[in-house]
Image: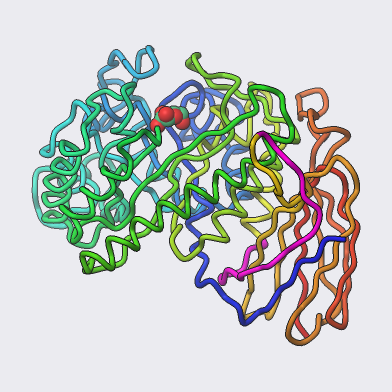
Amino acid sequence: MNTIKIDPDRTLGTLDRNVFGGFAEHLGRCIYGGIYDEGSPLADAEGYRRDVIQAVKRLGMPIIRYPGGNFVSGYRWMDGIGPQDERPPRAELAWRTVESNRFGTDEFVRWCRLVGAEPYLAVNCGDGDMREARDWVEYCNGTTDTALVRLRRRNGSEQPHRVRYWGIGNEVDGPWQMGMKTPEEYARAFTEFGKMMKMVDPDIRLIASWTSGWFDDWVERGQLLLEQAPRLVDYMAIHWYVGNPDDDFGRYMALSELFEDRLTAAEGLINAMRVCRQLPRPVYLAVDEWNVWYRTRGDNRLEEVYNLEDALVVAMQLNAFIRHARSVKMANLAQVVNVIAPMMTWEDGLVLQTTFHPFEIYSRQAGSVALDAYWEGETFQGGDRVGVRVLDVSATLNPEEREVSVFVVNRSLEATEAEIVLQEGAWGGSGKSWVVTGPDIKATNTRENPEAVTAVERPVAASGARLRLTLEPHSVTALTLPLA
Ligand code: AHR
């Protein structure tokens, strides 16, 4: 028997909705043919795909990072503004293509407003300089009568874009990055870029590129950033991509332990620096690229087709963000459409991938307070991880509605019995459950069979303190129940 214990008073703190963020890069068909599809009958008059807008709205992403990714390290933002036919096509070195620049800052900000998301821009800290970075802040957010503000107005945006979130560089620790930086070089660059950008707009929030490769120097990188820029850095960005290259289900499912290790270590370093150096203000984690990505490494379209086991791993990552809600205040699913994405477009429509469904349910059902759920029960061995619990769990509270949501990944290939025990008070009657599963762990959603893996909604009711349930094999279950 597996037991999940929930105490609504045992809170971890506020769950920042920005953990349900997304990421869109000029890469493959994410922008062109995904978000923006000029001439398509499925696009609106401005060229935005209406079906993509609807699906992104369903995901409830409150923030979307743009324009890269590796792309940003060679990007000149000024190429992407002004009359579209006059914009210069450029050789794009990160993904070895030609960038038309028909989609740029103003198109992105307008699209964010259409999907209800805040724009989060990353500046070029690869082959770009701090002048370009500060000019971009001024172009977007400036209100005084300057040449850059006039330019924005001439380009159709009278009002400032009010972009609050700004990342400085992308994956600067990686040898694949244009303008890769040593820990010292990046700490200096972040400090000077950030200083100038905040001079233009003191209200912006800055995200530092911490680690993506998790190389031996990641602790040093974090420490130097926090030592040199404690008054500038708001978020420390970490990235990861995971996969199942050995086709080993157990090892894949045990990746929850890696997420725990990394988040615990990263927040531990920030805490250590807070105590040791008396950091003047809170610094949070932004997991501003995360996902499953392993099949399409090495190509430049990254059109990964996801199966059910990938959907379970997406849910496990969301569980980890909820369990670390005290420190993880932003996370961005990479990416939103076509490129390692929860949806894939075609000329005549769109398919929701398996991973779409857990993301939608978590984003919609999670309450504003993360709870410290305890659970015990059956275990398995995955790779070299022993004693891993078969269930992977997180829980939240919606204090206004007095509702608890419990998110459970059943990593067993069998149906699994579980009991959810409320440690204080009683359940208050009728609620709802959503189950994401499919015929087998390799099931995918295709154009021919778009609903092999979906979410099935069912009523659920509970009174008293205990709720018994049977979790379907290889499934994600979300339950939202009122408190009495
Ligand atoms: O999301 C795809 C790529 O993965 C991004 O461009 C880069 O930041 C990461 O390595």
35 or 199: which is nearer to us? Answer: 199
**Which color scheme did the rendering employ for the protein?**
rainbow
Residue 481 in which image quadrant: bottom right
**Quarter of the rendering occupied by the N terminus:** bottom right
Residue 382 is covered by the magenta coloring: yes
> What residue is rendered at 66% in x and 41% in y?
254
> What residue is rendered at 41% in x and 57% in y?
267
202 or 281: which is nearer to us? Answer: 281
Residue 338 in which image quadrant: top right
Residue 420 is covered by the magenta coloring: no
Figure label count = 0
Q: x, y percentage for residue 260? A: 54, 51
Please state if 441 lies on the left or on the right of 57 as rendered.
Answer: right
466 or 318: which is nearer to us? Answer: 466
Please state if 455 lies on the left or on the right of 201 as rendered.
Answer: right
Residue 211 in which image quadrant: top left
Q: x, y percentage for residue 409? A: 74, 50
> What residue is rendered at 38% in x and 12% in y?
97
> What residue is rendered at 10% in x and 38% in y?
131
The range drawn in magenta is: 365-383
**Quarter of the rendering occupied by the C terminus:** bottom right
Q: x, y percentage for residue 393? A: 69, 58
Q: x, y percentage for residue 114? A: 49, 48
